Amino acid sequence: FRLYWDRPTFRQYKRLLIIIPVAAFAVGFLVHFYSAGLFWRILAYIAVYHFVRQQYGFMRLYSRQEQSSRLGRLIEAIAIYNATLYPLVYWHIHLTDSLSWFVAGDFIPLPLAAAGPYLWYLFFAILLTYTVREITVSIRHRFFNIPKNLIVYGTYCSWYAGIVWFEGDLIFTLLNVVAHGIPYMGLIWIHGEKKAAGSFSFSWKGVAIFAGVLLLLAYLEETVWDVFVWKDHAVVFPFLIEAAPLEDPLVLSLIVPLLVLPQVTHYVLDGFIWRFSKDRHARV
Protein backbone atom coordinates (compact mmCIF):
# COMPACT_ATOMS: atom_id res chain seq x y z
CA PHE A 1 0.00 0.00 0.00
CA ARG A 2 2.58 2.57 1.10
CA LEU A 3 5.08 1.97 -1.68
CA TYR A 4 3.96 -0.43 -4.40
CA TRP A 5 0.38 0.86 -4.72
CA ASP A 6 1.39 4.50 -4.45
CA ARG A 7 2.32 5.30 -8.04
CA PRO A 8 4.42 8.46 -7.48
CA THR A 9 6.40 6.78 -4.70
CA PHE A 10 6.85 3.59 -6.73
CA ARG A 11 8.13 5.53 -9.74
CA GLN A 12 10.52 7.49 -7.57
CA TYR A 13 12.05 4.40 -5.95
CA LYS A 14 11.30 1.87 -8.69
CA ARG A 15 14.78 0.38 -8.91
CA LEU A 16 15.04 -0.25 -5.17
CA LEU A 17 11.48 -1.59 -4.94
CA ILE A 18 12.24 -4.13 -7.68
CA ILE A 19 15.74 -5.12 -6.54
CA ILE A 20 14.74 -5.87 -2.94
CA PRO A 21 12.12 -8.58 -3.64
CA VAL A 22 14.19 -10.11 -6.45
CA ALA A 23 17.27 -10.32 -4.21
CA ALA A 24 15.19 -11.58 -1.28
CA PHE A 25 13.70 -14.36 -3.40
CA ALA A 26 17.10 -15.40 -4.76
CA VAL A 27 18.64 -15.59 -1.28
CA GLY A 28 15.55 -17.34 0.08
CA PHE A 29 15.66 -19.97 -2.65
CA LEU A 30 19.34 -20.73 -2.04
CA VAL A 31 18.97 -20.93 1.74
CA HIS A 32 15.81 -23.07 1.62
CA PHE A 33 17.32 -25.43 -0.93
CA TYR A 34 20.35 -25.82 1.34
CA SER A 35 18.32 -26.27 4.54
CA ALA A 36 14.63 -25.67 5.15
CA GLY A 37 15.26 -25.51 8.91
CA LEU A 38 17.93 -22.85 8.49
CA PHE A 39 15.60 -20.90 6.20
CA TRP A 40 12.82 -20.78 8.80
CA ARG A 41 15.25 -19.98 11.63
CA ILE A 42 16.73 -17.02 9.76
CA LEU A 43 13.27 -15.80 8.78
CA ALA A 44 12.05 -16.11 12.38
CA TYR A 45 14.84 -13.93 13.72
CA ILE A 46 14.39 -11.38 10.93
CA ALA A 47 10.70 -11.24 11.86
CA VAL A 48 11.52 -10.88 15.55
CA TYR A 49 13.89 -8.01 14.84
CA HIS A 50 11.21 -6.34 12.71
CA PHE A 51 8.48 -6.66 15.35
CA VAL A 52 10.72 -5.45 18.16
CA ARG A 53 11.97 -2.45 16.20
CA GLN A 54 8.49 -1.62 14.94
CA GLN A 55 7.13 -1.12 18.45
CA TYR A 56 10.03 1.21 19.19
CA GLY A 57 9.23 3.10 15.99
CA PHE A 58 5.56 3.49 16.95
CA MET A 59 6.53 4.74 20.39
CA ARG A 60 8.93 7.31 18.91
CA LEU A 61 6.29 8.39 16.37
CA TYR A 62 3.75 9.16 19.08
CA SER A 63 6.25 10.91 21.33
CA ARG A 64 7.84 13.13 18.68
CA GLN A 65 6.07 16.26 19.97
CA GLU A 66 7.24 15.77 23.56
CA GLN A 67 10.10 17.85 24.93
CA SER A 68 11.87 14.97 26.66
CA SER A 69 15.39 15.02 28.05
CA ARG A 70 18.04 12.61 26.84
CA LEU A 71 17.52 10.55 30.01
CA GLY A 72 13.77 10.52 29.43
CA ARG A 73 14.16 9.27 25.86
CA LEU A 74 16.58 6.61 27.10
CA ILE A 75 14.08 5.40 29.70
CA GLU A 76 11.37 5.23 27.03
CA ALA A 77 13.61 3.27 24.67
CA ILE A 78 14.67 0.79 27.38
CA ALA A 79 11.04 0.37 28.45
CA ILE A 80 9.68 -0.45 24.99
CA TYR A 81 12.52 -2.87 24.26
CA ASN A 82 11.99 -4.43 27.68
CA ALA A 83 8.35 -5.07 26.75
CA THR A 84 9.37 -7.33 23.87
CA LEU A 85 12.82 -8.67 24.77
CA TYR A 86 11.98 -10.16 28.18
CA PRO A 87 9.12 -12.29 26.80
CA LEU A 88 11.39 -13.35 23.93
CA VAL A 89 14.17 -14.38 26.33
CA TYR A 90 11.56 -16.27 28.39
CA TRP A 91 10.45 -18.03 25.20
CA HIS A 92 14.04 -19.02 24.39
CA ILE A 93 14.60 -20.35 27.92
CA HIS A 94 11.36 -22.20 28.58
CA LEU A 95 9.20 -22.61 25.47
CA THR A 96 11.27 -23.59 22.44
CA ASP A 97 9.87 -27.14 22.61
CA SER A 98 6.22 -26.08 22.86
CA LEU A 99 6.02 -22.80 20.89
CA SER A 100 7.27 -21.75 17.50
CA TRP A 101 7.33 -18.51 15.57
CA PHE A 102 6.92 -20.14 12.18
CA VAL A 103 7.79 -23.84 12.50
CA ALA A 104 8.89 -26.12 15.32
CA GLY A 105 12.50 -25.58 16.36
CA ASP A 106 12.98 -22.21 14.70
CA PHE A 107 14.21 -20.58 17.94
CA ILE A 108 17.52 -21.57 19.53
CA PRO A 109 17.05 -22.66 23.17
CA LEU A 110 19.00 -20.72 25.81
CA PRO A 111 20.31 -22.60 28.90
CA LEU A 112 19.58 -19.70 31.25
CA ALA A 113 16.83 -21.10 33.47
CA ALA A 114 18.75 -20.19 36.65
CA ALA A 115 18.77 -16.54 35.61
CA GLY A 116 15.00 -16.48 35.07
CA PRO A 117 13.99 -14.89 38.43
CA TYR A 118 16.65 -12.17 38.15
CA LEU A 119 15.55 -11.35 34.61
CA TRP A 120 11.97 -11.00 35.81
CA TYR A 121 13.00 -8.59 38.59
CA LEU A 122 14.90 -6.54 36.02
CA PHE A 123 11.88 -6.60 33.72
CA PHE A 124 9.58 -5.37 36.49
CA ALA A 125 12.07 -2.72 37.66
CA ILE A 126 12.27 -1.23 34.16
CA LEU A 127 8.49 -1.18 33.82
CA LEU A 128 8.13 0.44 37.25
CA THR A 129 10.78 3.07 36.42
CA TYR A 130 8.98 4.00 33.20
CA THR A 131 5.61 4.18 34.96
CA VAL A 132 6.92 6.41 37.76
CA ARG A 133 8.56 8.71 35.23
CA GLU A 134 5.39 8.96 33.15
CA ILE A 135 3.30 9.82 36.20
CA THR A 136 5.83 12.44 37.34
CA VAL A 137 6.17 14.06 33.90
CA SER A 138 2.42 14.01 33.31
CA ILE A 139 1.73 15.79 36.60
CA ARG A 140 4.50 18.31 35.99
CA HIS A 141 3.35 19.20 32.46
CA ARG A 142 -0.37 18.50 33.01
CA PHE A 143 -0.37 16.33 29.91
CA PHE A 144 -0.58 12.56 29.46
CA ASN A 145 0.45 11.16 26.10
CA ILE A 146 -2.31 8.62 25.51
CA PRO A 147 -1.23 7.24 22.09
CA LYS A 148 2.38 6.72 23.20
CA ASN A 149 1.35 4.95 26.39
CA LEU A 150 -1.22 2.82 24.60
CA ILE A 151 1.64 1.57 22.42
CA VAL A 152 3.98 1.00 25.38
CA TYR A 153 1.52 -0.66 27.76
CA GLY A 154 -0.27 -2.44 24.94
CA THR A 155 3.05 -4.00 23.92
CA TYR A 156 3.71 -5.07 27.49
CA CYS A 157 0.27 -6.65 27.77
CA SER A 158 0.27 -8.43 24.41
CA TRP A 159 3.80 -9.84 24.59
CA TYR A 160 3.80 -10.74 28.29
CA ALA A 161 0.30 -12.19 28.29
CA GLY A 162 0.68 -14.14 25.05
CA ILE A 163 4.11 -15.60 25.81
CA VAL A 164 4.64 -15.66 29.59
CA TRP A 165 1.13 -15.96 31.01
CA PHE A 166 -0.63 -18.13 28.44
CA GLU A 167 2.46 -19.63 26.78
CA GLY A 168 0.54 -19.90 23.55
CA ASP A 169 1.72 -18.92 20.09
CA LEU A 170 -1.87 -18.58 18.84
CA ILE A 171 -2.85 -16.22 21.66
CA PHE A 172 0.37 -14.27 21.22
CA THR A 173 -0.23 -14.01 17.47
CA LEU A 174 -3.74 -12.67 17.99
CA LEU A 175 -2.60 -10.17 20.63
CA ASN A 176 0.39 -9.12 18.55
CA VAL A 177 -1.88 -8.32 15.63
CA VAL A 178 -3.56 -5.75 17.87
CA ALA A 179 -0.28 -4.27 19.15
CA HIS A 180 1.51 -4.30 15.80
CA GLY A 181 -0.81 -4.71 12.85
CA ILE A 182 -3.68 -2.37 13.68
CA PRO A 183 -1.51 0.73 14.39
CA TYR A 184 0.43 0.02 11.21
CA MET A 185 -2.77 -0.32 9.19
CA GLY A 186 -4.03 2.91 10.73
CA LEU A 187 -0.90 4.81 9.72
CA ILE A 188 -1.08 3.49 6.15
CA TRP A 189 -4.76 4.42 5.86
CA ILE A 190 -4.25 7.93 7.30
CA HIS A 191 -1.31 8.47 4.96
CA GLY A 192 -3.40 7.50 1.93
CA GLU A 193 -6.32 9.68 3.00
CA LYS A 194 -4.11 12.71 3.58
CA LYS A 195 -2.23 12.32 0.32
CA ALA A 196 -5.41 11.85 -1.72
CA ALA A 197 -7.45 14.63 -0.14
CA GLY A 198 -4.81 16.94 1.31
CA SER A 199 -6.31 16.44 4.78
CA PHE A 200 -7.50 13.51 6.85
CA SER A 201 -11.21 12.64 6.91
CA PHE A 202 -12.80 9.64 8.60
CA SER A 203 -15.13 7.36 6.66
CA TRP A 204 -16.54 3.99 7.73
CA LYS A 205 -16.92 3.08 4.05
CA GLY A 206 -13.22 3.75 3.50
CA VAL A 207 -12.31 1.67 6.54
CA ALA A 208 -14.50 -1.21 5.36
CA ILE A 209 -13.00 -1.24 1.87
CA PHE A 210 -9.45 -0.91 3.18
CA ALA A 211 -9.86 -3.70 5.74
CA GLY A 212 -11.77 -5.86 3.26
CA VAL A 213 -8.97 -5.71 0.70
CA LEU A 214 -6.41 -6.65 3.36
CA LEU A 215 -8.52 -9.57 4.62
CA LEU A 216 -9.09 -10.84 1.08
CA LEU A 217 -5.38 -10.72 0.23
CA ALA A 218 -4.51 -12.41 3.53
CA TYR A 219 -7.06 -15.19 2.94
CA LEU A 220 -5.81 -15.82 -0.60
CA GLU A 221 -2.21 -16.04 0.61
CA GLU A 222 -3.08 -18.41 3.46
CA THR A 223 -5.12 -20.52 1.07
CA VAL A 224 -2.06 -21.10 -1.12
CA TRP A 225 0.02 -21.92 1.98
CA ASP A 226 -2.50 -24.48 3.21
CA VAL A 227 -3.24 -26.07 -0.14
CA PHE A 228 0.37 -26.57 -1.25
CA VAL A 229 2.47 -26.61 1.93
CA TRP A 230 0.81 -27.07 5.32
CA LYS A 231 -2.45 -28.99 4.75
CA ASP A 232 -3.61 -28.45 8.33
CA HIS A 233 -6.71 -26.20 8.08
CA ALA A 234 -8.98 -27.90 5.57
CA VAL A 235 -12.10 -26.50 7.25
CA VAL A 236 -10.97 -22.92 6.73
CA PHE A 237 -9.43 -23.52 3.28
CA PRO A 238 -11.62 -26.22 1.66
CA PHE A 239 -9.83 -26.22 -1.70
CA LEU A 240 -8.02 -29.11 -3.40
CA ILE A 241 -8.39 -31.15 -0.22
CA GLU A 242 -7.39 -34.37 -1.97
CA ALA A 243 -4.16 -32.90 -3.32
CA ALA A 244 -1.05 -33.96 -1.44
CA PRO A 245 1.26 -31.25 -0.07
CA LEU A 246 4.34 -30.50 -2.11
CA GLU A 247 7.38 -32.58 -1.15
CA ASP A 248 9.89 -32.05 -3.92
CA PRO A 249 12.78 -30.03 -2.39
CA LEU A 250 13.34 -27.97 -5.53
CA VAL A 251 9.67 -27.08 -5.94
CA LEU A 252 9.34 -26.22 -2.25
CA SER A 253 12.44 -24.06 -2.48
CA LEU A 254 10.70 -22.11 -5.22
CA ILE A 255 7.22 -21.95 -3.66
CA VAL A 256 8.07 -21.20 -0.01
CA PRO A 257 10.40 -18.21 -0.63
CA LEU A 258 7.85 -16.90 -3.11
CA LEU A 259 5.07 -17.10 -0.53
CA VAL A 260 7.10 -15.40 2.20
CA LEU A 261 8.28 -12.71 -0.23
CA PRO A 262 5.63 -10.14 0.85
CA GLN A 263 6.72 -10.54 4.47
CA VAL A 264 10.44 -10.40 3.74
CA THR A 265 10.02 -7.39 1.46
CA HIS A 266 8.03 -5.65 4.16
CA TYR A 267 10.68 -6.40 6.78
CA VAL A 268 13.42 -4.94 4.60
CA LEU A 269 11.49 -1.90 3.39
CA ASP A 270 10.12 -1.05 6.81
CA GLY A 271 13.38 0.61 7.73
CA PHE A 272 12.82 3.09 4.88
CA ILE A 273 9.05 3.32 4.64
CA TRP A 274 8.57 6.47 6.71
CA ARG A 275 11.72 8.18 5.44
CA PHE A 276 11.24 7.92 1.70
CA SER A 277 9.09 10.90 0.91
CA LYS A 278 10.03 14.42 1.94
CA ASP A 279 6.77 16.08 0.97
CA ARG A 280 4.44 16.96 3.82
CA HIS A 281 1.51 14.96 2.45
CA ALA A 282 3.47 11.72 2.52
CA ARG A 283 4.17 11.88 6.24
CA VAL A 284 1.63 10.87 8.85
Image (tube, grey):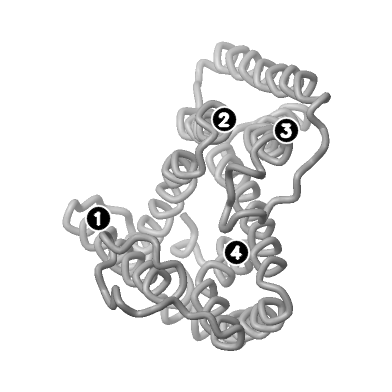
Give the answer, above or below, for where 164 lies relative to 237.
above
Q: Residue at x 65, y 21 (%)?
A: 127
Which residue lies under the disc numbered 4?
Answer: 267
Secondary structure state at the residue bearing disc 1: helix
What amino acid is labelled 1 in the image? Val
Q: How far separated are the C-alphas under marks 2 and 1?
A: 30 Å
Judge the density around disc 4: few (<14), some (14-19), many (≥20) Cα neighbours within 10 Å.
Answer: some
Secondary structure state at the residue bearing disc 2: helix
What amino acid is labelled 3 in the image? Ile
Q: Are marks 2 and 1 in contact (CB under 8 Å)?
A: no
Mark 1 or 4, closer to the camera: 4
Q: Residue at x 48, y 80 (%)?
A: 246
Q: Residue at x 45, y 52 (%)?
A: 184
Q: How far separated are the C-alphas under marks 3 and 1?
A: 34 Å
Q: Identify which residue, 66 or 261, lies in the foreground.
A: 261
Which residue lies under the disc numbered 1?
Answer: 207
Q: How far separated are the C-alphas under marks 3 and 2?
A: 16 Å
Judge the density around disc 1: few (<14), some (14-19), many (≥20) Cα neighbours within 10 Å.
Answer: few
